[in-house]
Image: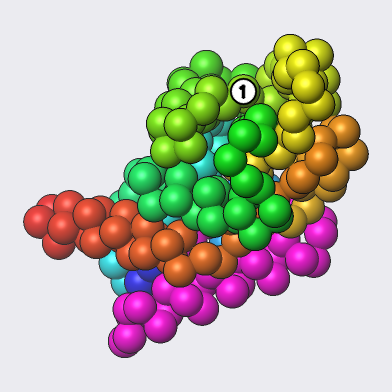
Amino acid sequence: MLLLVAHGTRDPAGALATEALAERVRAALPGERVRVAYADVRSPSVTDVLLRHRGEPVVVVPAFLAAGYHVRVDIPAQIEASGHRHAVLAEAFGPAPELVAVVIERLRESGYRGGDRVVLAAAGSSDPRALVDVHDAAYALGVRLGAPVRIGYAATATPSVADAVAGVRAASPGGARIAVASWLLAPGLFQRRLDTAGADLVADPLGAHRRVADLVVRRYTEAHRVLTAA
């Protein structure tokens, strides 16, 4: 079984995006059971689902763009609390190349064109290792776009997205447009903060894109080898 774990949001659109991603994964893995759980805010929790599937090998795939607190502490604790003996935790998404490609696609859908300045907007974390993942994603995006990319955070870390946008605008004589690229997986409170950050363009979150589903399958396959070899 593949257990896809999202952060969780009170916004129904966020949950719908997670379920849509799970549906894409089911289509890519015919015959494999795919369930959804949430690390916070929504239910079921990881523990809830694992308790229902005690005797079944499970690969837990954290749908997180950076390996912060939830990935390193919270989700492992929920797995342990379930007492499940045949569960393995896959790697988080991180700054995977396929996700950077999705960010560029979402930017272009928003109206981005060459010469626009770009701010990559991430959720933020108190874990410096998670922020390294964001910096790696921004660097990879800048290489693909052929221009520097600034970083802004929707919460927890600094600078905020609004401050990053203001900084880029102040440093961009001639009135260049500013586009915010969303390094978020689903709609919700954080994505709405991007809309009010003062940019000219705001891209949609990654969502249930085909490439995101491909990455879930890759993380599952990598971890499943470990599970079957144990």
Q: Secondary structure at mark 1?
A: strand
Residue 107 placement (x, y as % from top left): 62, 50
Residue 104 placement (x, y as % from top left): 53, 49
**152 or 171, nearer to the observer:** 171
Question: What span is in magenta?
Answer: 4-32
Q: Please state if 184 lies on the left or on the right of 53 as rendered.
A: right
The residue depicted at 77 percent of the width and 66 percent of the height is 13
Q: Residue furthest left?
A: 229
The residue depicted at 60 percent of the width and 72 percent of the height is 19
Residue 225 placement (x, y as % from top left): 16, 58
Magenta residue check for 13: yes
Q: Quadrant of residue 183?
A: top right
Which quadrant is the N terminus positioned in?
bottom left
The residue depicted at 78 percent of the width and 22 percent of the height is 174
Residue bearing mark 1: 150
From where the camera sits, is residue 14 visible? yes
Establish if 158 lies above or below 149.
above
Q: Please state if 161 lies on the left or on the right of 64 as rendered.
A: right
The residue depicted at 66 percent of the width and 35 percent of the height is 116
Residue 169 placement (x, y as % from top left): 79, 21
Q: Amino acid at mark 1?
A: Arg
Q: Quadrant of residue 149?
A: top right
Q: Please state if 96 lies on the left or on the right of 82 as rendered.
A: left
**53 or 149, nearer to the observer:** 149
Count up the numbered dots: 1
